Image (spheres, rainbow, N blue to C red):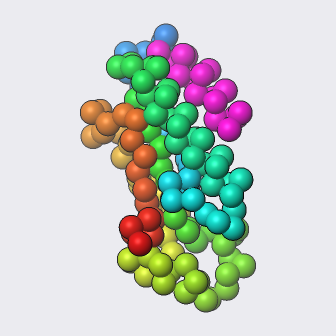
């Protein structure tokens, strides 16, 4: 959380001072929203990033939009250890598959774009419906 805090403070102020408007997107996790009993500290730090996102959205006001993306399980080298059987996670999601990295990138791109100029302090879950179950 220290790194996220420092980046928000430094880049938020830099954007505020040097441009008309700007946008920052933090990365958190769906575990920061729902809590994960097998990764309590991880979930707590991700919840902290959610709080930082909302607090800095208010602090930086109308000059800098601050949002976050909260991915669910995404197909990355870190999740390769699941092998071909990811049913222990996908059984709990609505879309019944692991997400792709480009789906997270698309969400970030949207929040940074001019299509999202009226969105700030929002946590966009990109989790295949995992957090709904």
Residue 3, visible in the rendered structure: yes
Residue at the image point whose x is 68% and y is 58% from the top: 40
In this picture, is 132 found above or below 3?
Answer: below
Please tell me how many numbered marks the rendered image carries: 0
Residue 26, visible in the rendered structure: no
Residue at the image point whose x is 47% and y is 15% from the top: 16
Is 107 positioned to the left or the right of 37 in the image? Answer: left
Is 94 positioned to the left or the right of 40 in the image? Answer: left
The quadrant in which residue 21 appears is: top left
Which residue is nearer to you in this view: 30 or 118? 30
Which residue extends farthest top?
17
In this picture, is 96 found above or below 7?
Answer: below
Picture coordinates of residue 79 (x, y %)? 66, 72
Look at the image and say whether residue 6 sits in the magenta stretch.
Answer: yes
Q: Magenta residues, as a range? A: 1-16
Q: Pick the quarter of the image with the N terminus.
A: top right
Picture coordinates of residue 65 (x, y %)? 40, 29
Which residue is nearer to you in this view: 51 or 102? 51
Which residue is nearer to you in this view: 110 or 90? 90
Is 71 positioned to the left or the right of 22 in the image? Answer: right
Picture coordinates of residue 97 (x, y %)? 47, 79
Q: Pick the quarter of the image with the C terminus.
A: bottom left
Picture coordinates of residue 94 (x, y %)? 38, 77
Residue at the image point whose x is 37% and y is 34% from the top: 120
């Amino acid at each position: 959380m220290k790194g996220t805090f420092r980046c928000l403070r430094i880049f938020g102020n830099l954007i505020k001072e040097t441009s008309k408007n700007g946008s920052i997107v933090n990365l958190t996790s769906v575990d920061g929203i729902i809590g994960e009993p097998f990764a309590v500290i991880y979930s707590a730090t991700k919840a902290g990033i959610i709080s930082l996102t909302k607090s800095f959205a208010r602090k930086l006001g109308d000059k800098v939009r601050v949002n976050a993306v909260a991915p669910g399980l995404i197909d990355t080298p870190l999740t390769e250890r699941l092998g071909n059987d990811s049913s222990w996670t996908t059984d709990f999601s609505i879309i019944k598959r692991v997400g792709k990295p480009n789906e997270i990138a698309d969400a970030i791109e949207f929040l940074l774009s001019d299509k999202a100029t009226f969105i700030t302090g929002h946590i966009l879950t990109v989790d295949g419906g995992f957090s709904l179950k």
